[in-house]
Image (cartoon, helix red, strand yellow):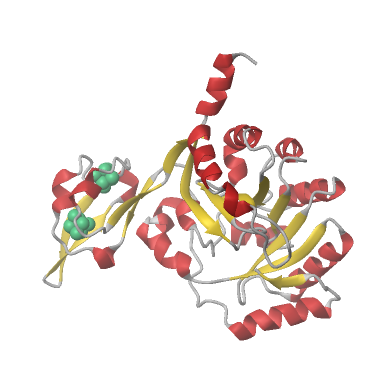
Amino acid sequence: MTEQLIDQKKGQKAVLFDIQRFSVNDGPGIRTNLFFKGCPLRCIWCHNPESYLFQKQLSFNPSSCTGCMACVQVCPRGVNTPVKLDGKEFLAVEYEKCSACGRCLDVCCYDARSIVGKEYTVEEVKEQIYTDLEYYKIKDEEGQTGGITLTGGEPMSQFEFVDRLLDELPGIHVCMETSGYGSTWQYERLLGRVDLFLFDYKATDPDTHKRLCGVDNRRILDNLSFLCENKADMILRLPLVPGINDDEGHLKAIAELIRKHPNIRRGEVMAYHNMGVAKAEHVGISEQAKIQRYSGPSATKEQKEEWLKRLKNYGLKHIKLG
Ligand code: SF4
Ligand code: SF4
């Protein structure tokens, strides 16, 4: 490979909305989580709705806003407009006009504004990962060491970057959390390079999947079969929302799937919590993504225990709360 080509590869960029260090919830050991921006699905309960869109975007928290109106003056696109209602002045934000230039952040003294998403090169991400190399060696209670987790959003949506980054990480354990909605050839390229897939399984019936997640699950099931046929190490992640996708047919299908495929270590129930609701409002996502989000209360302890019990009733041994 020529030096020019190597430089091009290292200069490849991705938009991430977070790099989280010292995570212990997304794969074994201590991990660095890379959150990729952009997702082809539109799950109505999404915990990270700021990751739906691929581009950088404005987040505005009205509860931190004092109404000083400094952002109104500085914005070149007229995104922010003072509005009077019942004698009170507040700020209306037209998100779709915003270019995420960030000028209003400089004048907002109350941290009511932020830009979600930042571009990183392969080299910049690699530098962050290598900072924590020593922590990855620490064993967890199952005796496993850590590494990095590619998550999002959907990391497969920025596949070229992922492909190039993985070339730079020999010897580092890699987990990928995925909706399964990439192309099969992409998953094929990841065999032997991603050590553990955290594969989301959200609904069994294709029409229900389309209604809840914006796309049907045929491609997802094909990719799941492909990874299972190739004995990829996998944990099935199971987002469950009370009254939305916790029907008997789905739980039975989960149990059968895990029992059938020995490469699936276990299922992990990802119980719904409603922290995504405020985040969705702050980035104005309901209007921009044109979806009706679910905003019910978080799953209770009793509901979580009930799900585990029902799954175990179908003969499933390897199941826990994630
Ligand atoms: S500058 Fe900040 S505090 Fe002032 S109106 Fe704009 S968002 Fe609110
Ligand atoms: S980020 Fe730029 S375009 Fe968007 S509201 Fe702020 S100043 Fe206006």
275 sits to left or right of 282: right
Q: Tell whether 103 sits left or right of 231.
A: left
Tell whether 18 sits left or right of 57. Answer: right
Residue 290 seen anywhere in this rendered image of the structure: no
Above or below, comparing residue 62 to residue 232 in the picture: below
Is 286 or 142 nearer to us in this picture?
A: 142
Q: Indicate the quadrant where residue 118 lies.
A: top left
Instruction: Using the image as rendered, state which of residue 92 and residue 157 is in the foreground.
Output: 157
Q: Position of residue 89 (x, y in %)?
A: 14, 65
Q: Quadrant of residue 76?
A: top left
Quarter of the picture holding the C terminus: bottom right
Residue 128 x %, y %: 50, 43
Q: Residue at position x 62%, y 33% from top?
A: 168
* Residue depicted at x 74% and y 59%: 235
**Looking at the rendering, in which quadrant would you find the N terminus?**
top right
Taking the spot 47% from the left edge, 65% from the top edge, the residue there is 276
Q: Residue at x 48, y 44 (%)?
A: 16
The residue most toward the left is: 87
Relative image position of residue 31 (x, y in whole percent):
59, 54
Q: Quadrant of ligand 2?
A: top left
Which is more toward the observer, 124 or 207?
124
Q: Residue 190, image x and y in percent?
A: 72, 39
Q: How many marks?
A: 0
Q: Is residue 112 left or right of residue 196?
A: left
